[in-house]
Image (cartoon, rainbow, N blue to C red):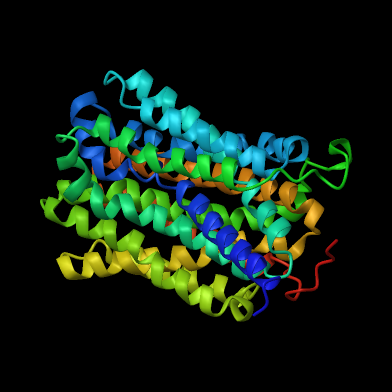
Amino acid sequence: MTDATRPAIRSAGFHLALLWLIGVQLRLTVLAVPPVLPLIHRDLALSEKAVGVLSALPILLLALAALPGSLMVARLGARRGCILGLLLVASASAARGIGPSAPMLYGMTLAMGIGVALMQPTLPTLVSEWFADRVAFATAIYANGLLIGEAIPAAITISWVLPLVGGSWEWSFAFWSIPVVVTALLLATATPHVPRALAAAEYRWWPDWRRALPLGLLLGGTGGLYFSTNTFIPDYLHAIGQPWLVGPCLTAINAGQLPASFLVLAFSRQLNGKRIVFIVSPLLAFLGTAALLMPYPAVIVASAGLVGSCCGIQIILSLALPPLLADVDDVHHLSAGMFAIGYFVSFLVPPLGGAIWDVTQIPATSFIAGALSTVLVLGAALTLRIAPAGSAPRR
């Protein structure tokens, strides 16, 4: 290895690590909510529908702010837009616990969702800018970070973070904001601003909705199942008299995504853009959702893990589709269209599950909406036109 090649390798390794770390922050503060939902439910006297809305608010903002995020990338560039999103996520997430107050909780959750939404279109663009020749692998790297960001709060909030902050769900939100600030500082100080090759006015930001629709339905069906299952597992297990399973089940559904992410990392070229994965995976997820209702603790935990694994595979391969299908200058607005449709669908599912529970007064019915999400993924996969990997024109 020559001296000339060492800086490039170090730079590539650092940028991959930074992509991974940014991916973690896409979900870390959002998934800090489910482990403490019973405490929030108790202190603020929320209905099941209100609990569903609280969990779904960031998802709604991921949809509504996707287009401003695309415009921001076109105007500011992906790096600066990502820094702005990270700082907004950190400040709003920490402020959710002020009070405690339901208006403050909902208002700051709304602001936090805007920050995450602004970050979303920047990641596929950063992948195209930093790793134009390794898009599938780099996407799998940041998606792996995203999945780990979902797993960490579920795994350690109840057992470690809450005791550290004196059992306060309010201070637990402030705790999870710390790594977001660190990531923003790293991105701001350790990477340079690269002027865009085209003038900002030349970059398109409004999505081609026809192209984005099937991608959005794939993402939305996956997110709807994942977020609704995370939302209702804690209260469902309390309702059936098995609260001790909350920690293991939330860990299983989130950590269950990690083997799936490593599988995609190892076989990114072989799996990327393959329709059959989007057909088999939702069928398995449907079976896993149904098995959550079994009366056996081991089966419940294993089923949560199966649902998480299927969601992990689907979300990584969905996120890899815009860089696969679009020119590098068009990735941000195709991604924005996918996020706008996908997260709007994902937003609808948890409140629908909570409304069904409120109407029927049967805890198990809260999973009906999530099960229907698997049908949505299957339908979108059957209609999606996926070009062979590497066929998209790139500048």
- The residue lying toward the viewer, choosing from 187 and 218, is 187
Q: Quadrant of the C terminus?
A: bottom right
Q: Locate residue 13 relative to residue 158 in the image: left or right.
A: right
Q: Which residue is drawn at 35% across and 59% down?
A: 254
Q: Can residue 341 be seen in this view?
A: yes
Residue closest to the eye, 182 or 28: 182
Instruction: Describe residue 103's horizontal placement relative to residue 274 as left or right.
Output: left
**Above or below: residue 185 compared with residue 272:** above
Residue at 58 percent of width and 38 percent of height: 83
Rendering coords of residue 346 (x, y %)? 50, 47
Whether residue 379 appears in this view of the structure is no
What x and y, as percent, mark residue 96?
A: 36, 27
Establish if 264 lies above or below 319. Answer: below
Report the residue that reaches farthest toward the front: 3
Tell me the residue at 46%/73% (across/down): 262
Q: In this view, does 249 lie to the left or right of 148?
A: left
Seen from the viewer's position, the closer of residues 109 and 143 is 143
The image shows residue 227 at horizontal and vertical percentages of 41, 49
The answer to whether residue 250 is above or below residue 361 is: below
The image quarter containing residue 41 is top left
Q: Quadrant of residue 378 in the image?
A: bottom right
**Quadrant location, the N terminus:** bottom right
Residue 58 pos. (x, y %): 47, 37
Front-lying residue, 278 or 85:
85
